[in-house]
């Protein structure tokens, strides 16, 4: 089955978003309730919050927290997952702990971090990192288990240095797993950071959403959501999809 060409695929994605907006406006026209503002009202609210500097300020803080926690979690989870996949004895020791960490509700971890470390940035970032690292570790563990030993043997037969074996033989086999971990990781980190900010921070998008909720300001909630959605689309289109095409170009 042939994959659609890139321009065609991009057009389909744009049309799907336009279709969602059309459905949204149609529902607003039929229902006529204050609980669901129109797309135009949301865009106007987005513009006002941006013009006042409020949205860029809080969005920048949230993105900073996401970038730091995601980067640390990716490094820790990748190293841990690869080691667990390579060394069975270590995997046996850590498997139960990893399963436990995966199934502890994120809310519990967030509350404990705030109680133990206080309402500060360290607690906020730690809560996100602790919640995300096990997911990445599990993904990379499966990747390490799936590494083709015959390719590693070929590298040794050609007497490649350990560095070249790592960069040209071992890691390329893990790239699809890195991509999967990054994509699912971003999707989860967004959500956890917002919950952290809602519960224990005095800045960020999550904090602002909690204020809007108290005043039932649905338009502002959707305006901040729209801003976040634009960032997500930009990351997906500008970073993840090009990386995916490069990693999977051999298929």
Image (cartoon, rainbow, N blue to C red):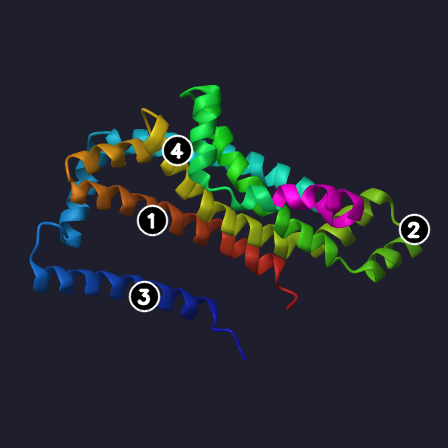
Residue 87 in view of the camera: no
Q: How far apart are labels 4 and 3 at the CA level?
A: 31 Å
- For this view, does 81 lie left or right of residue 6? right
Which residue in the protein does label 1 denote?
229
Mark nearer the viewer, 1 or 4:
4
> How far apart, in angstroms, are the residues tagged by discs 1 and 3?
14 Å
Q: Residues within 10 Å of mark 2 (few under 14, many from 20)?
A: few
Do the residues bearing badges 4 and 3 touch, measured as CB atoms within 8 Å?
Answer: no
Residue 103, percent from left and from top: 52, 46
Q: Which residue is tagged 3?
A: 16
> Which residue bears the numbered disc 2?
159
Magenta stretch, residue numbers: 82-98
Pointer 1 or 2: first along the chain: 2
Q: What is the tally of numbered marks visible in this picture?
A: 4
Q: Quadrant of the C terminus?
A: bottom right
The overriding secondary structure of the stretch rendered in magenta is helix
Mark 3: which secondary structure? helix
Rendered position, 195 above or below 87: above
Q: Nearer the viewer, mark 1 or mark 2?
A: 1
Q: Callout 1: 10 Å neighbours few (<14), some, many (20+)?
A: few
- Tell me: 185 left or right of 176: left
What residue is at 37 percent from the left and 29 percent from the top?
61
Judged from the image, the secondary structure of the residue bearing numbered disc 4 is: helix
- Residue on which the image places disc 4: 196
């Amino acid at each position: 089955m042939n994959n659609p060409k890139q321009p065609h695929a991009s057009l389909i994605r744009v049309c799907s978003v336009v279709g969602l907006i059309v459905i949204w406006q149609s529902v607003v026209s039929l229902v006529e309730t204050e609980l669901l503002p129109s797309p135009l009202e949301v865009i106007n609210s987005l513009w006002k919050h941006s013009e006042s500097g409020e949205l860029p300020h809080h969005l920048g803080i949230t993105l900073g927290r996401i970038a730091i926690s995601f980067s640390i979690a990716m490094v820790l989870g990748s190293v841990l997952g690869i080691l667990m996949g390579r060394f069975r004895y270590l995997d046996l020791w850590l498997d139960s702990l990893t399963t436990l960490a995966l199934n502890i509700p994120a809310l519990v971890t967030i509350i404990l971090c705030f109680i133990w470390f206080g309402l500060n940035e360290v607690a906020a970032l730690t809560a996100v990192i602790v919640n995300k690292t096990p997911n990445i570790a599990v993904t990379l563990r499966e990747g390490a288990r799936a590494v083709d030993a015959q390719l590693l043997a070929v590298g040794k037969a050609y007497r490649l240095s350990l560095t070249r074996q790592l960069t040209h033989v071992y890691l390329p086999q893990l790239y699809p797993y890195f991509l999967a971990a990054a994509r699912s990781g971003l999707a989860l980190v967004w959500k956890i950071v917002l919950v952290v900010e809602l519960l224990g921070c005095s800045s960020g998008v999550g904090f602002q959403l909690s204020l809007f909720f108290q005043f039932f300001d649905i338009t502002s909630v959707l305006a901040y959501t729209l801003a976040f959605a634009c960032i997500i689309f930009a990351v997906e289109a500008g970073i993840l999809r090009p990386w995916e095409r490069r990693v999977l170009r051999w298929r």
